[in-house]
Protein backbone atom coordinates (compact mmCIF):
# COMPACT_ATOMS: atom_id res chain seq x y z
CA UNK A 1 0.00 0.00 0.00
CA UNK A 2 1.30 3.47 -0.91
CA UNK A 3 2.08 5.78 2.01
CA UNK A 4 -0.55 8.53 2.21
CA UNK A 5 0.52 11.60 0.24
CA UNK A 6 0.43 14.87 2.17
CA UNK A 7 -2.55 17.09 1.43
CA UNK A 8 -0.13 19.68 0.03
CA UNK A 9 1.17 17.16 -2.52
CA UNK A 10 -2.31 15.86 -3.42
CA UNK A 11 -3.47 19.43 -4.08
CA UNK A 12 -0.36 20.21 -6.11
CA UNK A 13 -1.00 17.20 -8.37
CA UNK A 14 -4.63 18.27 -8.89
CA UNK A 15 -3.62 21.83 -9.80
CA UNK A 16 -0.93 20.53 -12.17
CA UNK A 17 -3.60 18.32 -13.75
CA UNK A 18 -5.73 21.44 -14.39
CA UNK A 19 -2.79 23.10 -16.18
CA UNK A 20 -2.10 20.00 -18.29
CA UNK A 21 -5.76 19.61 -19.28
CA UNK A 22 -5.73 23.19 -20.56
CA UNK A 23 -2.42 22.69 -22.39
CA UNK A 24 -3.57 19.43 -23.98
CA UNK A 25 -7.19 20.51 -24.58
CA UNK A 26 -7.09 20.19 -28.37
CA UNK A 27 -5.12 16.93 -28.29
CA UNK A 28 -7.75 15.39 -25.97
CA UNK A 29 -10.60 16.55 -28.25
CA UNK A 30 -8.79 15.25 -31.37
CA UNK A 31 -8.08 11.86 -29.80
CA UNK A 32 -11.66 11.65 -28.58
CA UNK A 33 -12.86 12.28 -32.15
CA UNK A 34 -11.08 9.05 -33.17
CA UNK A 35 -13.00 7.21 -30.41
CA UNK A 36 -16.27 8.80 -31.60
CA UNK A 37 -15.59 7.90 -35.25
CA UNK A 38 -14.75 4.32 -34.23
CA UNK A 39 -17.95 3.85 -32.20
CA UNK A 40 -20.22 1.48 -34.11
CA UNK A 41 -22.99 0.99 -31.54
CA UNK A 42 -26.46 2.51 -31.77
CA UNK A 43 -26.76 3.59 -28.11
CA UNK A 44 -27.32 7.34 -28.39
CA UNK A 45 -26.88 7.93 -24.66
CA UNK A 46 -23.51 6.13 -24.70
CA UNK A 47 -22.40 8.21 -27.69
CA UNK A 48 -23.43 11.37 -25.83
CA UNK A 49 -21.41 10.36 -22.75
CA UNK A 50 -18.42 9.39 -24.90
CA UNK A 51 -18.08 12.81 -26.53
CA UNK A 52 -15.48 15.31 -25.25
CA UNK A 53 -15.79 18.90 -26.43
CA UNK A 54 -14.55 22.25 -25.06
CA UNK A 55 -17.36 22.36 -22.51
CA UNK A 56 -16.43 18.89 -21.20
CA UNK A 57 -12.75 19.88 -20.89
CA UNK A 58 -13.85 23.04 -19.05
CA UNK A 59 -15.79 20.83 -16.60
CA UNK A 60 -12.76 18.58 -16.06
CA UNK A 61 -10.54 21.59 -15.31
CA UNK A 62 -13.15 23.09 -12.99
CA UNK A 63 -13.49 19.75 -11.20
CA UNK A 64 -9.80 19.27 -10.33
CA UNK A 65 -9.35 22.95 -9.49
CA UNK A 66 -12.29 22.85 -7.10
CA UNK A 67 -11.05 19.61 -5.53
CA UNK A 68 -7.69 21.24 -4.82
CA UNK A 69 -9.48 24.04 -2.91
CA UNK A 70 -11.46 21.69 -0.65
CA UNK A 71 -10.51 20.63 2.86
CA UNK A 72 -8.68 17.33 3.32
CA UNK A 73 -11.36 14.65 3.90
CA UNK A 74 -8.80 12.35 5.60
CA UNK A 75 -8.08 12.59 9.33
CA UNK A 76 -11.23 14.54 10.20
CA UNK A 77 -12.27 13.90 13.83
CA UNK A 78 -15.83 12.53 13.97
CA UNK A 79 -16.06 11.51 17.62
CA UNK A 80 -13.99 11.75 20.80
CA UNK A 81 -14.36 10.08 24.18
CA UNK A 82 -12.39 10.14 27.43
CA UNK A 83 -12.50 6.70 29.05
CA UNK A 84 -12.88 6.38 32.84
CA UNK A 85 -9.41 4.78 32.90
CA UNK A 86 -7.82 7.85 31.31
CA UNK A 87 -7.56 6.58 27.72
CA UNK A 88 -8.28 9.21 25.08
CA UNK A 89 -10.35 7.82 22.21
CA UNK A 90 -10.86 9.42 18.78
CA UNK A 91 -12.62 8.32 15.64
CA UNK A 92 -11.21 9.89 12.48
CA UNK A 93 -11.85 9.56 8.75
CA UNK A 94 -9.39 7.41 6.79
CA UNK A 95 -8.86 6.60 3.14
CA UNK A 96 -10.09 3.26 1.79
CA UNK A 97 -6.72 2.37 0.26
CA UNK A 98 -7.27 1.34 -3.35
CA UNK A 99 -10.42 2.24 -5.29
CA UNK A 100 -11.27 0.52 -8.57
CA UNK A 101 -13.55 2.53 -10.87
CA UNK A 102 -15.15 0.52 -13.69
CA UNK A 103 -16.99 2.70 -16.19
CA UNK A 104 -18.42 2.99 -19.67
CA UNK A 105 -17.88 5.62 -22.35
CA UNK A 106 -17.21 8.67 -20.13
CA UNK A 107 -13.68 10.07 -20.41
CA UNK A 108 -14.62 12.80 -17.90
CA UNK A 109 -14.82 10.06 -15.23
CA UNK A 110 -11.06 9.53 -15.80
CA UNK A 111 -10.61 13.05 -14.44
CA UNK A 112 -13.49 13.76 -12.07
CA UNK A 113 -14.08 10.44 -10.30
CA UNK A 114 -10.36 9.66 -10.22
CA UNK A 115 -9.72 13.15 -8.84
CA UNK A 116 -12.16 12.67 -5.96
CA UNK A 117 -10.71 9.27 -5.11
CA UNK A 118 -7.15 10.66 -5.31
CA UNK A 119 -7.93 13.68 -3.11
CA UNK A 120 -9.39 11.23 -0.58
CA UNK A 121 -5.96 9.61 -0.28
CA UNK A 122 -6.67 6.53 -2.37
CA UNK A 123 -4.74 4.75 -5.06
CA UNK A 124 -6.87 4.68 -8.22
CA UNK A 125 -7.41 1.74 -10.58
CA UNK A 126 -9.32 2.74 -13.72
CA UNK A 127 -11.08 0.27 -16.01
CA UNK A 128 -12.82 2.17 -18.79
CA UNK A 129 -14.77 0.82 -21.75
CA UNK A 130 -13.09 -0.07 -25.03
CA UNK A 131 -15.11 2.63 -26.82
CA UNK A 132 -13.23 5.37 -24.90
CA UNK A 133 -9.80 3.72 -24.68
CA UNK A 134 -7.81 6.33 -26.62
CA UNK A 135 -9.34 9.24 -24.72
CA UNK A 136 -8.79 7.53 -21.36
CA UNK A 137 -5.17 6.63 -22.07
CA UNK A 138 -4.41 10.24 -23.04
CA UNK A 139 -5.91 11.52 -19.78
CA UNK A 140 -4.07 8.90 -17.70
CA UNK A 141 -0.85 10.02 -19.41
CA UNK A 142 -1.59 13.51 -18.02
CA UNK A 143 -2.21 12.09 -14.53
CA UNK A 144 1.20 10.41 -14.68
CA UNK A 145 2.85 13.60 -15.84
CA UNK A 146 1.21 15.58 -13.01
CA UNK A 147 2.33 12.97 -10.45
CA UNK A 148 5.91 12.85 -11.76
CA UNK A 149 6.24 16.64 -11.81
CA UNK A 150 5.28 16.66 -8.10
CA UNK A 151 7.65 13.79 -7.19
CA UNK A 152 4.84 11.31 -6.60
CA UNK A 153 4.73 7.75 -7.89
CA UNK A 154 2.70 7.11 -11.05
CA UNK A 155 1.35 4.04 -9.18
CA UNK A 156 -1.28 6.33 -7.64
CA UNK A 157 -3.25 6.21 -10.92
CA UNK A 158 -3.23 2.97 -12.91
CA UNK A 159 -5.22 2.09 -16.03
CA UNK A 160 -6.28 -1.54 -16.49
CA UNK A 161 -6.49 -2.52 -20.17
CA UNK A 162 -8.61 -5.63 -19.54
CA UNK A 163 -11.22 -7.29 -21.71
CA UNK A 164 -14.38 -8.66 -20.11
CA UNK A 165 -12.85 -12.06 -19.25
CA UNK A 166 -9.73 -10.46 -17.75
CA UNK A 167 -11.91 -8.05 -15.77
CA UNK A 168 -13.97 -10.94 -14.35
CA UNK A 169 -10.79 -12.78 -13.35
CA UNK A 170 -9.41 -9.66 -11.67
CA UNK A 171 -12.66 -9.09 -9.75
CA UNK A 172 -12.71 -12.69 -8.51
CA UNK A 173 -8.96 -13.01 -7.89
CA UNK A 174 -7.37 -9.54 -7.72
CA UNK A 175 -3.63 -9.51 -8.40
CA UNK A 176 -3.30 -6.50 -6.10
CA UNK A 177 -5.25 -5.24 -3.13
CA UNK A 178 -8.60 -3.59 -3.92
CA UNK A 179 -10.61 -2.06 -1.05
CA UNK A 180 -13.61 -0.61 -2.88
CA UNK A 181 -15.15 -0.91 -6.35
CA UNK A 182 -17.32 1.75 -7.99
CA UNK A 183 -19.08 0.66 -11.21
CA UNK A 184 -20.29 3.60 -13.33
CA UNK A 185 -22.58 2.50 -16.12
CA UNK A 186 -25.70 0.61 -17.09
CA UNK A 187 -27.50 -2.12 -15.18
CA UNK A 188 -25.64 -4.94 -16.96
CA UNK A 189 -22.25 -3.54 -15.89
CA UNK A 190 -23.42 -3.10 -12.29
CA UNK A 191 -24.87 -6.65 -12.15
CA UNK A 192 -21.63 -8.04 -13.61
CA UNK A 193 -19.49 -6.30 -10.97
CA UNK A 194 -21.79 -7.30 -8.09
CA UNK A 195 -21.74 -10.91 -9.24
CA UNK A 196 -17.95 -11.24 -9.41
CA UNK A 197 -16.51 -8.74 -6.91
CA UNK A 198 -14.85 -9.99 -3.72
CA UNK A 199 -14.77 -6.60 -1.94
CA UNK A 200 -17.37 -3.89 -1.18
CA UNK A 201 -19.12 -2.31 -4.18
CA UNK A 202 -20.82 1.10 -4.27
CA UNK A 203 -23.83 0.70 -6.53
CA UNK A 204 -24.15 3.71 -8.81
CA UNK A 205 -27.67 2.73 -9.71
CA UNK A 206 -30.12 3.30 -12.48
CA UNK A 207 -32.38 6.31 -12.83
CA UNK A 208 -35.99 5.77 -13.96
CA UNK A 209 -37.12 8.94 -12.22
CA UNK A 210 -40.71 10.08 -11.65
CA UNK A 211 -42.47 13.46 -11.57
CA UNK A 212 -45.89 13.61 -9.88
CA UNK A 213 -48.16 16.47 -10.93
CA UNK A 214 -50.42 16.84 -7.87
CA UNK A 215 -53.94 18.27 -8.19
CA UNK A 216 -52.74 21.53 -6.61
CA UNK A 217 -49.79 21.90 -8.97
CA UNK A 218 -48.66 25.10 -10.64
CA UNK A 219 -48.87 23.69 -14.17
CA UNK A 220 -46.25 26.07 -15.60
CA UNK A 221 -43.74 24.78 -13.02
CA UNK A 222 -44.81 21.21 -13.90
CA UNK A 223 -44.14 21.80 -17.61
CA UNK A 224 -40.74 23.37 -16.94
CA UNK A 225 -39.66 20.58 -14.55
CA UNK A 226 -40.73 17.78 -16.90
CA UNK A 227 -39.12 19.36 -19.97
CA UNK A 228 -35.90 20.03 -18.04
CA UNK A 229 -35.99 16.39 -16.91
CA UNK A 230 -35.74 15.32 -20.57
CA UNK A 231 -33.08 17.91 -21.51
CA UNK A 232 -30.27 15.36 -21.25
CA UNK A 233 -31.48 11.86 -22.01
CA UNK A 234 -28.14 10.17 -21.22
CA UNK A 235 -28.15 11.37 -17.59
CA UNK A 236 -29.20 9.08 -14.75
CA UNK A 237 -31.16 12.01 -13.27
CA UNK A 238 -33.39 12.33 -16.38
CA UNK A 239 -37.17 11.93 -16.06
CA UNK A 240 -38.78 8.86 -17.62
CA UNK A 241 -42.22 8.73 -15.95
CA UNK A 242 -44.86 11.39 -15.31
CA UNK A 243 -47.87 10.72 -13.07
CA UNK A 244 -50.76 13.18 -13.33
CA UNK A 245 -53.39 13.46 -10.62
CA UNK A 246 -56.82 12.58 -11.99
CA UNK A 247 -58.30 15.59 -10.11
CA UNK A 248 -55.93 18.17 -11.64
CA UNK A 249 -58.05 21.13 -12.81
CA UNK A 250 -58.01 21.56 -16.61
CA UNK A 251 -56.19 18.25 -16.81
CA UNK A 252 -56.94 17.60 -20.49
CA UNK A 253 -55.59 21.00 -21.54
CA UNK A 254 -52.44 20.51 -19.42
CA UNK A 255 -51.73 17.05 -20.86
CA UNK A 256 -52.20 18.36 -24.41
CA UNK A 257 -49.73 21.19 -23.73
CA UNK A 258 -47.24 18.74 -22.24
CA UNK A 259 -47.51 16.27 -25.14
CA UNK A 260 -47.12 19.11 -27.65
CA UNK A 261 -43.94 20.40 -25.95
CA UNK A 262 -42.46 16.90 -25.71
CA UNK A 263 -43.15 16.13 -29.35
CA UNK A 264 -41.63 19.48 -30.38
CA UNK A 265 -38.46 18.24 -28.67
CA UNK A 266 -38.62 14.99 -30.68
CA UNK A 267 -39.51 12.93 -27.59
CA UNK A 268 -41.67 9.84 -28.10
CA UNK A 269 -44.66 10.00 -25.75
CA UNK A 270 -46.33 6.85 -24.43
CA UNK A 271 -49.43 6.71 -22.25
CA UNK A 272 -51.04 4.32 -19.81
CA UNK A 273 -54.50 3.04 -20.73
CA UNK A 274 -56.33 6.21 -19.63
CA UNK A 275 -53.91 8.75 -21.08
CA UNK A 276 -53.32 6.91 -24.37
CA UNK A 277 -57.07 6.64 -25.07
CA UNK A 278 -57.78 10.27 -24.13
CA UNK A 279 -54.89 11.71 -26.14
CA UNK A 280 -54.43 9.21 -29.02
CA UNK A 281 -50.99 8.04 -27.90
CA UNK A 282 -49.31 4.67 -28.22
CA UNK A 283 -50.29 2.62 -25.20
CA UNK A 284 -48.19 0.19 -23.17
CA UNK A 285 -48.43 -3.56 -23.51
CA UNK A 286 -47.03 -4.48 -20.09
CA UNK A 287 -46.57 -2.89 -16.67
CA UNK A 288 -42.91 -3.95 -16.88
CA UNK A 289 -42.22 -0.73 -18.79
CA UNK A 290 -42.73 1.21 -15.54
CA UNK A 291 -39.49 -0.43 -14.27
CA UNK A 292 -37.52 0.59 -17.34
CA UNK A 293 -34.85 3.31 -17.47
CA UNK A 294 -35.17 4.68 -21.01
CA UNK A 295 -31.92 6.64 -21.58
CA UNK A 296 -33.68 7.70 -24.76
CA UNK A 297 -35.96 10.33 -26.28
CA UNK A 298 -38.96 8.62 -24.70
CA UNK A 299 -41.33 9.34 -21.80
CA UNK A 300 -44.35 7.58 -20.27
CA UNK A 301 -47.33 9.52 -18.89
CA UNK A 302 -49.89 7.95 -16.57
CA UNK A 303 -52.90 9.05 -14.56
CA UNK A 304 -53.03 8.41 -10.81
CA UNK A 305 -55.72 8.77 -8.13
CA UNK A 306 -53.82 10.27 -5.18
CA UNK A 307 -50.54 11.13 -3.49
CA UNK A 308 -50.63 7.84 -1.55
CA UNK A 309 -51.04 5.81 -4.76
CA UNK A 310 -48.19 7.79 -6.34
CA UNK A 311 -45.88 7.03 -3.39
CA UNK A 312 -46.70 3.32 -3.65
CA UNK A 313 -46.13 3.31 -7.40
CA UNK A 314 -42.78 5.11 -7.23
CA UNK A 315 -41.60 2.83 -4.42
CA UNK A 316 -42.51 -0.20 -6.54
CA UNK A 317 -41.15 0.81 -9.94
CA UNK A 318 -38.48 3.52 -9.62
CA UNK A 319 -34.72 2.95 -9.57
CA UNK A 320 -34.42 4.54 -6.13
CA UNK A 321 -32.67 7.58 -7.61
CA UNK A 322 -34.83 10.75 -7.75
CA UNK A 323 -38.48 11.80 -7.68
CA UNK A 324 -40.31 15.12 -7.67
CA UNK A 325 -43.75 16.36 -6.62
CA UNK A 326 -45.21 19.48 -8.20
CA UNK A 327 -47.70 21.05 -5.77
CA UNK A 328 -48.57 24.26 -3.94
CA UNK A 329 -49.70 22.19 -0.93
CA UNK A 330 -46.83 22.05 1.60
CA UNK A 331 -48.43 19.23 3.64
CA UNK A 332 -48.83 17.01 0.57
CA UNK A 333 -45.23 17.76 -0.46
CA UNK A 334 -44.02 16.78 3.04
CA UNK A 335 -45.95 13.50 2.90
CA UNK A 336 -44.50 12.70 -0.52
CA UNK A 337 -40.93 13.60 0.42
CA UNK A 338 -40.94 11.66 3.69
CA UNK A 339 -42.44 8.49 2.19
CA UNK A 340 -40.98 8.16 -1.30
CA UNK A 341 -37.99 5.81 -1.07
CA UNK A 342 -35.54 7.50 -3.44
CA UNK A 343 -32.08 8.93 -2.75
CA UNK A 344 -33.26 12.45 -3.63
CA UNK A 345 -36.77 13.88 -3.34
CA UNK A 346 -37.82 17.22 -4.82
CA UNK A 347 -40.66 19.67 -4.31
CA UNK A 348 -41.31 21.94 -7.31
CA UNK A 349 -37.81 21.38 -8.75
CA UNK A 350 -36.12 19.29 -11.41
CA UNK A 351 -34.58 15.87 -10.78
CA UNK A 352 -31.68 17.04 -12.97
CA UNK A 353 -30.18 18.60 -9.81
CA UNK A 354 -29.25 15.17 -8.43
CA UNK A 355 -25.57 15.76 -9.08
CA UNK A 356 -22.68 16.30 -6.68
CA UNK A 357 -21.75 19.68 -8.14
CA UNK A 358 -25.35 20.94 -8.09
CA UNK A 359 -26.00 19.78 -4.53
CA UNK A 360 -22.98 21.54 -3.09
CA UNK A 361 -20.46 18.69 -3.01
CA UNK A 362 -18.23 20.17 -5.70
CA UNK A 363 -18.36 16.95 -7.73
CA UNK A 364 -19.20 13.31 -7.34
CA UNK A 365 -17.62 9.90 -7.62
CA UNK A 366 -21.00 8.31 -8.32
CA UNK A 367 -24.68 8.54 -7.39
CA UNK A 368 -25.46 5.66 -5.06
CA UNK A 369 -28.92 4.10 -4.88
CA UNK A 370 -27.73 1.83 -2.07
CA UNK A 371 -28.35 2.88 1.51
CA UNK A 372 -24.87 1.95 2.78
CA UNK A 373 -22.56 3.69 3.32
CA UNK A 374 -23.78 6.83 1.55
CA UNK A 375 -26.89 7.47 -0.51
CA UNK A 376 -27.21 9.79 -3.50
CA UNK A 377 -24.23 11.76 -4.84
CA UNK A 378 -20.98 10.54 -3.29
CA UNK A 379 -18.68 13.50 -2.87
CA UNK A 380 -15.21 13.98 -1.51
CA UNK A 381 -16.32 13.86 2.13
CA UNK A 382 -18.09 10.52 1.60
CA UNK A 383 -15.25 8.62 -0.07
CA UNK A 384 -13.66 7.79 3.26
CA UNK A 385 -13.97 5.08 5.84
CA UNK A 386 -13.01 5.61 9.49
CA UNK A 387 -10.47 4.48 12.03
CA UNK A 388 -10.23 4.47 15.84
CA UNK A 389 -7.24 6.16 17.50
CA UNK A 390 -6.81 5.16 21.15
CA UNK A 391 -4.10 6.79 23.31
CA UNK A 392 -3.15 5.26 26.66
CA UNK A 393 -0.32 4.88 29.12
CA UNK A 394 -0.46 1.19 29.97
CA UNK A 395 -4.21 0.60 30.44
CA UNK A 396 -5.38 -3.03 30.34
CA UNK A 397 -8.86 -4.44 30.52
Image (cartoon, helix red, strand yellow):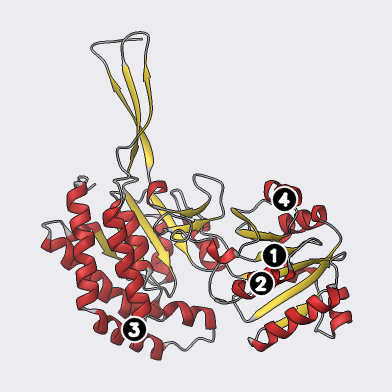
Residue 259: image x %, image y %? 74, 82
Q: Which tag is nearer the camera, tag 1 or tag 4?
A: 4
Asked if the residue under mark 3 is in contact with the one under mark 2, i.e. CB atoms within 8 Å, the reply is no
Q: CA distance from mark 1 to mark 4?
A: 16 Å
Give the label, 3 or 1, closer to the camera.
Answer: 1
Residue at 60% in and 73% down: 228
* Residue underneath mark 3: 32
Q: Is residue 176 visible?
A: no
- Residue shown at 44% from the left, 50% from the top: 198
Which residue carries the number 1 mark?
Answer: 211
Q: Residues within 10 Å of mark 4 (few under 14, many from 20)?
A: few
The quarter of the displayed image where residue 282 is located:
bottom right
Mark 2 and mark 1 in contact (Cβ < 8 Å)?
A: yes
Task: Evaluate if marks 1 and 4 touch, with contact meaning CB atoms under 8 Å apart.
Answer: no
Residue picked out by circle 4: 330
Q: Which residue bears the numbered disc 2?
A: 226
**Is the residue marked by circle 2 packed among few (<14), some (14-19), or many (20+) residues within 10 Å?**
many
Between residue 222 and residue 41, name the one nearer to us. Answer: 222
**Pick the front one: 212 or 320:** 212
Secondary structure category for the residue under label 3: helix
Query: Label for residue 376?
Result: none
Amino acid sequence: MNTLLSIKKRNAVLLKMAVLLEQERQAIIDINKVDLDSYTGDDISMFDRLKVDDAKVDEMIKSVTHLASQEDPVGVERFSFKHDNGMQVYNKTASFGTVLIIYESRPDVTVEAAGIAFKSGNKILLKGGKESLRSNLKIVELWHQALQEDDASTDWVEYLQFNRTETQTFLEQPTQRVDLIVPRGGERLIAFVKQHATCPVIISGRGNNFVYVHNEADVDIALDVIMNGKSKISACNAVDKVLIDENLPNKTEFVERLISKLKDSKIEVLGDETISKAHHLDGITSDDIWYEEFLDYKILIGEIASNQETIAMINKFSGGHSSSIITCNEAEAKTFMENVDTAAVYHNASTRFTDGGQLGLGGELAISTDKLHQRGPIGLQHLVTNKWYVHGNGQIR
